Each structure stands twice: as C-alpha cells, then as structure tokens.
C-alpha cells in the first residue's frame, strides 16, 4: 500500500529493479549498430546530470549495450518508500527525500557492477558524491537549457519543477550544479536527436578514457 513502509523509517531494504523489458527493447538496436566498449567494466557506471539530461533513457540503453543490469535510483527510492517521489516531497519534505536518496544509493553502490541512473540532485550530496568517486565510475550527461526545458515539458511530475517557471528553475539549478557535476569522471553532451547518438558518444568517451593502473574505469587522475 502506498506509504505503508513510511518514508522516514525506510531502511533501504533491497527491492526489485525496474522492469527489464523496456531496457532490453531500448538496447537491441544499440547492440547491432554501435561498437563494443573495449575494456571490461569493473565498476558500476553512475550517470549524473540535471532533470531531463537523459540519465534514465541513456542508462537503460548503455546497460543493455554492456549486458549489465540497469537500476534507476529514483524508481528504487519510490519502491523503498512505497510511494511516488512527488508524494515523498509532499508528505515528508525535500530533506527526508534527500536522506532516503543517500541511503538507497549507498545500498545500490554495494550491488554487483551495473549501470545506475541517479536522480538529478544525488551527486550534489557530499557523502553520496564521495561514495560514487570511491566505488563507481561517473558520467555527467550535460545538456543545454533549451533542450532540458523541451524535455522536461513532456512529463510534469518532478516536484522541483511544479508550480514554477521551469526555464528559470533549471537555469538556477544549472548555475549551482554544473560546477559539481563537472567533478564526474567523464562528461558527455546529451543532444537533441535520437538517444543512440548520445549513447554512441558515451561509448566513445569510455573507449577514449585512459585506464588507471589498477582499475579499468578507476577515476581519472588530473595531470598537474
Ligand atoms: N540523449 C537523448 N536523446 C534523445 N532523447 C532523449 C535523450 N535523453 C533523454 N531523452 C528523452 O528526454 C526525456 C527525459 O529523459 P530522462 O527521463 O532519461 O531524463 P533524466 O535525466 O532521467 O531525468 P530525471 O532526473 O528527471 O529522472 C525522455 O522523454 C527521454 O526519452
Ligand atoms: O534534480 C533533482 O533534485 C531531482 C531530480 C529527480 O530525478 C528526482 O530525484 C527528484 O525529483 C529530484
Ligand atoms: Mg531519470
């Protein structure tokens, strides 16, 4: 029943990942048309970026391409809380959502290697960010304001974008968040057009990434 577990007391009990059907369908074309990722993926790949950047859309396709499971942190949070993100915000407030988000992502990062789409605010949390840097390989899907405004207009259930000027709110979030998203291990532009074009850039960026000594996708060392 919706809300039966109670958000505030949520403990991050493992739940089923989002249905694989859509991911499998989304990934089939990519398998045939795009190159393989050359090195073995030895860390969970975490997608970060603003609402509408394509973390869920590209994440599903990347996972299918890599033959890895896909997890969407927003869906896992909803499953753990027993209600939608909008309901969590409305009933318990944003801070409770952020606390639950941190716990759920911590649990997900303990799972075997997979592709993880985070919610837009997850990487802004210093503890979550530190854990992602330690255990995972992060990719920022960067998109420009016009594109984000266009994409989020398709679905009106994001609490931060309700009853506000969406363009103004997204511009404000870009100013705050883009310098932090830039700490991700890779940055890939998410552009208009078919998702496969962005997926192709993600794959190319992974293949271009220079591996560190002990881990294929260990975080980059910045040259002095
Ligand atoms: N690179 C892309 N090319 C084409 N369409 C895309 C691309 N990325 C996302 N879309 C479309 O834009 C919309 C929003 O994408 P998506 O839900 O994946 O964003 P998100 O980053 O997961 O956002 P949120 O943080 O709100 O969960 C969807 O309709 C999706 O199909
Ligand atoms: O950017 C954000 O802060 C959010 C993005 C969504 O993915 C959800 O995690 C939630 O709506 C908050
Ligand atoms: Mg998403």
Image (spheres, rainbow, N blue to C red):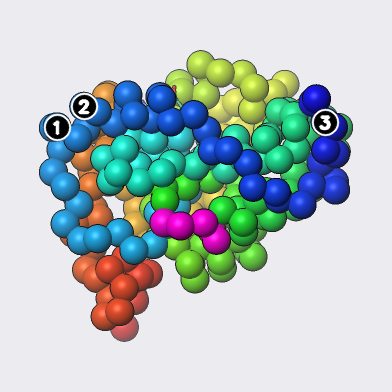
Sequence-first tag of 1 and 3? 3
Q: Is residue 188 above or below residue 64?
A: below
104 and 194: which one is in front? 104
* SS type, badge 3: loop
Q: Nearer the viewer, residue 194 or 80?
A: 80
Evaluate if marks 2 and 1 touch, with contact meaning CB atoms under 8 Å apart.
yes
Disc 1 is placed on an element classified as helix
Residue 18 visible in the picture: yes
Look at the image and say whether residue 10 sits in the magenta stretch: no
Mark 3 Cβ and ligand 2 under 8 Å apart? no
Name the element at disc 2: helix
Q: Pinpoint residue 36: horizontal percent, then vertical percent.
A: 16, 47
**Ligand 1 lies in which image quarter?**
top left
Q: Is residue 111 magenta?
A: yes
- Tell me the CA gap for discs 1 and 3: 42 Å
> Residue 63 at what x, y percent from top left?
35, 42
Task: Residue 4: name its quadrant.
Answer: top right
What kind of secondary structure does the magenta stretch mostly adopt? loop
Which mark sits nearer the N-terminus, 2 or 3?
Answer: 3
- Residue range in magenta is 109-113
According to the picture, the residue beneath numbered tag 1 turns out to be: 32
Q: Where residue 13 sits in the image (x, y, percent)?
A: 70, 49
Distance between the alpha carbons at the discs numbered 2 and 1? 6 Å
Residue 67, located in which quarter of the rendered image? top left
Q: Which residue is mark 3?
A: 3
Write the residue at 53% across / 45% down.
118
**Rounded to the nearest whole Å, what is the CA distance between mark 2 and mark 3?**
38 Å
- Near mark 3 (Cα within 10 A), the count class, few <14, some 14-19 or many ≥20, is some
Q: Which residue is mark 2?
A: 29
Q: Position of residue 69 (x, y in %)?
A: 41, 44
């Amino acid at each position: 029943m919706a809300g039966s577990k109670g958000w505030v007391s949520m403990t991050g009990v493992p739940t089923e990942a989002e249905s694989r059907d859509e991911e499998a369908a989304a990934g089939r074309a990519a398998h045939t048309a795009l190159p393989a990722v050359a090195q073995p993926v030895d860390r969970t790949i975490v997608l970060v970026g603003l609402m509408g950047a394509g973390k869920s859309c590209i994440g599903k396709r990347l996972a299918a391409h890599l033959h890895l499971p896909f997890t969407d942190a927003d869906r896992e949070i909803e499953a753990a809380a027993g209600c939608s993100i909008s309901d969590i915000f409305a009933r318990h407030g944003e801070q409770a959502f952020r606390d639950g988000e941190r716990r759920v992502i911590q649990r997900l990062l303990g799972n075997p290697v997979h592709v993880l789409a985070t919610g837009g605010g997850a990487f802004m949390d210093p503890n979550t960010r530190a854990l992602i840097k330690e255990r995972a390989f992060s990719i920022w899907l960067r998109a420009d304001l016009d594109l984000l405004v266009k994409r989020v207009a398709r679905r009106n259930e994001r609490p931060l974008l309700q009853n506000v000027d969406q363009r103004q709110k997204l511009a404000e979030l870009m100013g705050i968040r883009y310098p932090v998203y830039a700490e991700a291990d890779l940055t890939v532009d998410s552009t208009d057009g078919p998702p496969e074009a962005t997926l192709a850039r993600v794959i190319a960026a992974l293949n271009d990434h220079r591996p560190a000594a002990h881990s294929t996708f260990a975080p980059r060392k910045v040259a002095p």
